[in-house]
Image (spheres, helix red, strand yellow):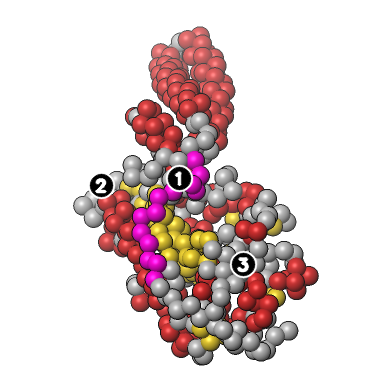
Amino acid sequence: MLQLSFLQRDKAGTLERLAKRGGEDFSSLVEAVLAEDQKRREGLSELERLRAESNKIAKAVGIAMAKGDAGAADEARRQTAELKAAIADLEKVVKQTEDRLHEQLVRLPNLPHESVPAGKSADDNLVVHERLRELPLWAEPQPHWDVLAKLGTIDFERGVKLTGSGFPVYVGAGAKLQRALIRFFLDRAEAAGYLEIQPPHLVNADSAFGTGQLPDKEGQMYFVGADNLYLIPTAEVPITNLYRDEILAEERLPIKLCGYTPCFRREAGSYGKDVRGLNRVHQFDKVEIVQIVRPEDAYPTLEEMTRYAESLLDDLELPYRRLLLCGGDMGFASAKTYDLEVWSAGQERWLEVSSVSCFESFQSHRLKLRYRPATGGKPVLAYTLNGSALALPRIVAALLENRRQADGSVSLPPCLHPYFGAERLQPGDKTL
């Protein structure tokens, strides 16, 4: 959530940075927030005046009673009662004003960092790094769904029968490959200094609000109405919320956490060839990394986390590129985001496998996540970052498409051999 003090201090700068997001004009919402805040401050000022007046008259009652002036005491009591009623009415008005202010303020997205390019869509993103490594052409590339038809390691049709479209069933070597990737990613994260967390897969509304999923992404999350809980769209939500409403010692920063979870996304309105196979599914596995840092460390940390995710793609021997997202393609809560995409040889397109984002104080303001400086003084808001390291479905798709052999097997990169227990996925492995 944006800090109101920033809007008050620099309305023009706020609107200029929000304009980078393209599309929606936020000027009327910013004006509404500032107008509501003006009403709130005027109401609080009037409350302060009325309370001071009430206290003054209350003292007059005692003075009149001490002098034996019953009439003056009664008049003072009457005035005190009127003031208390006026104060109670005004407190209700101020509370309603504060509620409206909050409802408007949480609808404003984060301000893009100065380095983020303006733009409306993915077409305006910038390619800032490519690693187009040459892979041996073992066989004519095919889309991964055609490769899977021969391998039988993922069953889409039975997933539809069990649940619906977008819920694949991983079978035999397919399930084993998922497990191998998860273990590889977690081991690498631990070696990089991340503490592994196994969080709940459902969260309450406060947690979803804290990281910015609510009220922006209600339509993308699965909701368990009977218990008022949400299935997590990413491990970012429960892991970052571990420190909600806490004040940390500065000496504890940076905090580096990682976790593997399934992720659940409704992806309402998704259709067409771009969602075929593993391109976009409603349930998938992902390893997430999260850092909580001091403000001055945030953007160097963003670069470090992005390079770390790239190192995983280097180990997997996959061609990839890094994109700097434009304002219009960033998430609601993000101040700056890099996307990593792998090359899909069978589809001849790029597939996103990681987003690494800095949220500055946007999440921590909602979370009330602060740290106390080592030098003393008031607690200040921490900065939060997270990234996918990595999401599995499109990694699997890229491995299948880029490493298919002429005999129908799929060669696995050496980093996965000890985890998978073999060098290839073979046709004829056990299937349903």
Residue occupying image coordinates x 49% and y 40%: 120
Q: For the residue labelled by badge 2, is the local secondary structure a helix, a strand or a loop? A: loop
Residue named by callout 1: 124
Question: Hey, what amino acid is under mark 3?
Answer: Leu
Asked if the residue at tag 1 contacts the one at tag 2, i.e. Cβ–Cβ closer than 8 Å, the answer is no
Residue named by callout 3: 278
Asked if the residue at tag 3 contacts the one at tag 1, i.e. Cβ–Cβ closer than 8 Å, the answer is no
Question: Hey, what amino acid is under mark 1?
Answer: Asp
Between 412 and 238, the one lying in front of the other is: 412
Residue lying furthest right: 161
Gap in Å between the C-alphas at discs 1 and 3? 25 Å
Residue occupying image coordinates x 27% and y 61%: 251
Residue 396 in view (yes/no): no
Between 125 and 333, the one lying in front of the other is: 125
Between 424 and 288, the one lying in front of the other is: 424
Q: Which residues are magenta?
A: 120-133
Residue occupying image coordinates x 51% and y 83%: 411
Q: Is residue 310 magenta?
A: no
Q: Nearer the viewer, mark 2 or mark 1?
A: 1
Checking the image for residue 377, the label placed there is 2
Gap in Å between the C-alphas at discs 3 and 2? 51 Å
Q: For the residue labelled by badge 3, is the local secondary structure a helix, a strand or a loop? A: loop
Q: Position of residue 432 (x, y in %)?
A: 73, 84
Is residue 323 placed above or below 35 in the rendered structure? below
Mark 3 burial class by Cα count in 10 Å: few <14, some 14-19, many 20+: many
Q: Nearer the viewer, mark 3 or mark 2?
A: 3
Question: Hey, what amino acid is under mark 2?
Answer: Gly
